[in-house]
Amino acid sequence: MGYQELLPVADYVADRLNKAGLTREQQQVTFEAFAHLISEYADFYSNEYERVGEKQDLGAHEALTELSQMFESEARYSTAKEG
C-alpha cells in the first residue's frame, strides 16, 4: 500500500537529531516517544477498522505500526556503542 511511501525513515530522523546536537541518550528518549505516539495512532486506526471495516483504516494501521517498530528499533541502536 502507498502509505509507507509517505512516512519518514528513521535514518533521516536520526541524522537530523545528530545535526541538532542531541546525545545518544536524548535520541533514544526521542525515538521512544515517537514510537509510543505513533503506536497510539496505529491502535486508533486498528479500532476504526474493526468498528467500521474501512480498508484504508487497516492500511493506516499497518503503516503506522511499521513506523512505530522502526522507531523502537532505532531507539535501541541509538545508544549502542560504535565499534
Image (cartoon, rainbow, N blue to C red):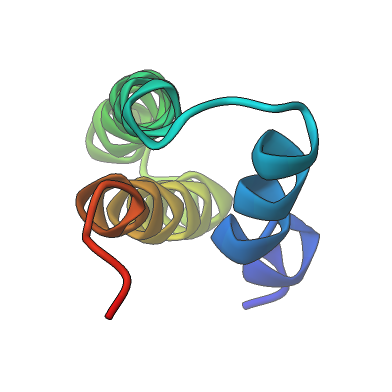
- Residue 74 x/y as whole percent: 36, 55
Is 21 situated left or right of 36 in this image? Answer: right
Is 56 situated left or right of 24 in this image? Answer: right
Rendered view: 37 above or below 1: above
- Residue 78 x/y as whole percent: 35, 50
The one nearer the camera, 60 or 49, is 60
Residue shown at 61%/64% (left/top)?
11
The one nearer the camera, 82 or 57, is 82
Number of numbered markers = 0
Residue that extends furthest to the front in the rendered view of this protein: 83
The one nearer the camera, 25 or 35, is 25
Residue shown at 62%/78% (left/top)?
1
Is 78 situated left or right of 20 in this image? Answer: left
- Residue 49 x/y as whole percent: 34, 40
Residue shown at 52%/49% (left/top)?
60
Residue shown at 41%/21% (left/top)?
26
- Residue 77 x/y as whole percent: 27, 59
Q: Quadrant of residue 62?
A: bottom left
The one nearer the camera, 82 or 29, is 82
In the rendered view of the protein, which quadrant contains the C terminus? Answer: bottom left
